[in-house]
Amino acid sequence: MASMKRLLAFLLACSVLESGEAADFTISAYDRTNNFTWNNVFSNAITTVEGIGATQLGKKVQDAWLEVDVVPGLKLLPRGSLPLDATRAVALAEAGVNLFAHLVRDKEMSDELIATMVKNKVYVNPNLGAAERNTHAALPDWADEPYLSGLLRDTVAPEVIARIRNSFSSRDVAEIARSQQQYAILKRSLAKLSKAGARIILGADTGLRDHIFGYAEQKELEFMVDGGMTPSEVIVAATRRAAEFIGLTDRGTLTPGKRADLLVLDANPLDDIRNTRRISKLYLAGIEVDRPALKESLTRPARN
């Protein structure tokens, strides 16, 4: 079809505690039947999607963002590479996109938009972490929280930790003030989405510079609670709801017969969501992971 726009197709990696994103792409799509693996994600990051039976999404998407064609079986994600403003968001929600990878950034999400998202079953990643980082004039308290900083020490090199800590020095006061105002908008929107029963799933811009796998998600859980969700709602967003979005029916809940991917914690996260960092044991497919061996492999100096 000569008039068909080409979509960018990318694996959305989803585990029990993470729903991934296709970073830096304006329009992304996920097809869980493609069976991509981490070994070929990067070589397949940009894949042309063409096929018989493709249907145009609709003029509202043309007006709101881009004219695209949707291949059945793909999920359409308008990505926040271009700022997702309120007008675009309503049109996209009405047109039937599957997920917003970020909240609206220019203003608090309206009742109309949220109602449309709920009605059309549009999922949303709050993705608060990057915005929250920009609100601090000095090293934030979470940087020295014992369990969180301990997880970081166990997984990355000291120079990376130093870079993260140094990034909070010599910041522009005016820019911090603007960031604080924007972050307040995001938090108010998240609270409204949660109250309305929107389909919220965990997303943390993982993989971007200093958004370390696991570390970024652990912070995001805390920010989601700070943004108005209960610990129980946040846990659902990170597990059952994330698996639901990807279409993984064999995991996401502690149910007999489902895949046993789980964390055993030393404290109750319903009392304090930060207790998800107090990890005692980790199981993947019912098999306990040797965490000391994993730590040693992650922190071993690279060979030349």
Image: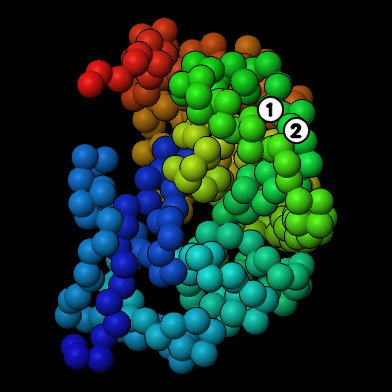
Residue 199 in the figure: left or right of residue 249: right
Q: Position of residue 77 (x, y in %)?
A: 45, 66
**Relative to 256, is 137 on the left or the right?**
right
Kindly state the secondary structure of the residue where label 1 is placed.
helix
Q: How many marks?
A: 2
Residue at 71% from the left image edge and 21% from the top image edge: 145
User: What residue would you read off at disc 1?
Assistant: 143
- Is 283 in front, or is 213? 213
Is 29 situated left or right of 96 in this image? left
| Residue type highlighted by circle 1 | Ala
Q: Nearer the viewer, residue 202 or 28?
A: 28
In the rendered image, the vertical position of residue 289 relative to residue 67, given as above or below:
above
Rendered image coloring scheme = rainbow
Q: Position of residue 6 (x, y in %)?
A: 27, 77
Labels 2 & 1 near each other (Cβ < 8 A): yes
Residue type, numbered disc 2: Pro
Decide which of 241, 278 is in the foreground and name it.
278
Mark on residue 258? none
Disc 2 marks which residue?
140
**x and y percent of residue 62 in the render?**
46, 88
At horizontal 22% and vertical 81% (from top left) the residue drawn is 53
Q: Residue furthest top?
A: 292
Residue at image location 34% in from the left, 15% down from the top: 301
